[in-house]
Image: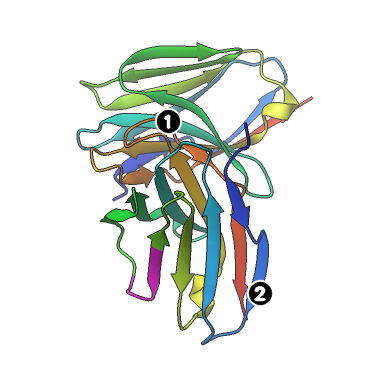
Amino acid sequence: KNEVEQSPQNLTAQEGEFITINCSYSVGISALHWLQQHPGGGIVSLFMLSSGKKKHGRLIATINIQEKHSSLHITASHPRDSAVYICAVQYNNNDMRFGAGTRLTVKP
Amino acid sequence: KAGVTQTPRYLIKTRGQQVTLSCSPISGHRSVSWYQQTPGQGLQFLFEYFSETQRNKGNFPGRFSGRQFSNSRSEMNVSTLELGDSALYLCASSLVVETEAFFGQGTRLTVV
């Protein structure tokens, strides 16, 4: 069983829709990251969270430490948001464990 | 401010050879971590270096090794390459431990 579970695995949305990607983890962590990976491999760090909520443009990330759960929301989705979104948990020794990723396709 | 730079971007090697990949972190960043991404296993942590010391290592065989130089640049080496080592190798740098990580574009290694 993966230490980090993401859902859904694949997600197709129409442009403008509100999108939620979920991430659950099993043990205590020092931080949680949401990453975006476009075709070609480059990874961009979207958020690093240790508590509460962060917002950047149309992206919102939340984390509930007690429930060991995080969500990534995209408001007013756009085709350029199409990518793989990866949840990663970071332990105190800087070791990271990754979810399998959510492949998002936003259709115009 | 320059981002994390990985070289080379693409590499083809034959089984049994060895390979060295390079990662130049963002200026001032002292922590460099390496990851392997394959279609079957996803992203997996290889090792992390901080101030020239390996602080943590993932579950990979001894054929995978790395080092960090005094300027924080890091290299990883894979010896006796196997077909299964074909992957995208990513490095990420952060200012110190437990701060936001910035990823490079990766090196895509193909072993034939």
User: What crowding class fits label 1: few (fewer than 14 Cα within 10 Å), some (14-19), or many (20 or more)?
Assistant: some
Give the residue type at disc 2.
Ile
Q: Is residue B65 magenta?
A: yes
In the figure, is residue A58 to the left or right of B45? Answer: right
> For the residue marked with disc 1, what is the amino acid?
Glu
Q: Is residue B42 above or below residue B10?
A: above
Say which element carries label 2.
strand
> What label sits on residue B5 in the rendered view?
none
Depicted A13 relative to depicted B83: above or below: above
**Is residue A9 in view?**
no
Tell me, yes or no, if residue A83 can be seen here.
Answer: yes
Q: Which residues are magenta?
A: B61-66
Task: Tell how many labels.
Answer: 2
Furthest-front residue in this view: B70
Is the C-beta separation of discs 1 and 2 under 8 Å? no
* Residue indicated by mark 2: B12
Mark 1 = which residue?
A: B100
* Residue at the image position 54 percent from the left and 64 percent from the top: B21
The residue closer to the viewer here, B84 or B95, is B95
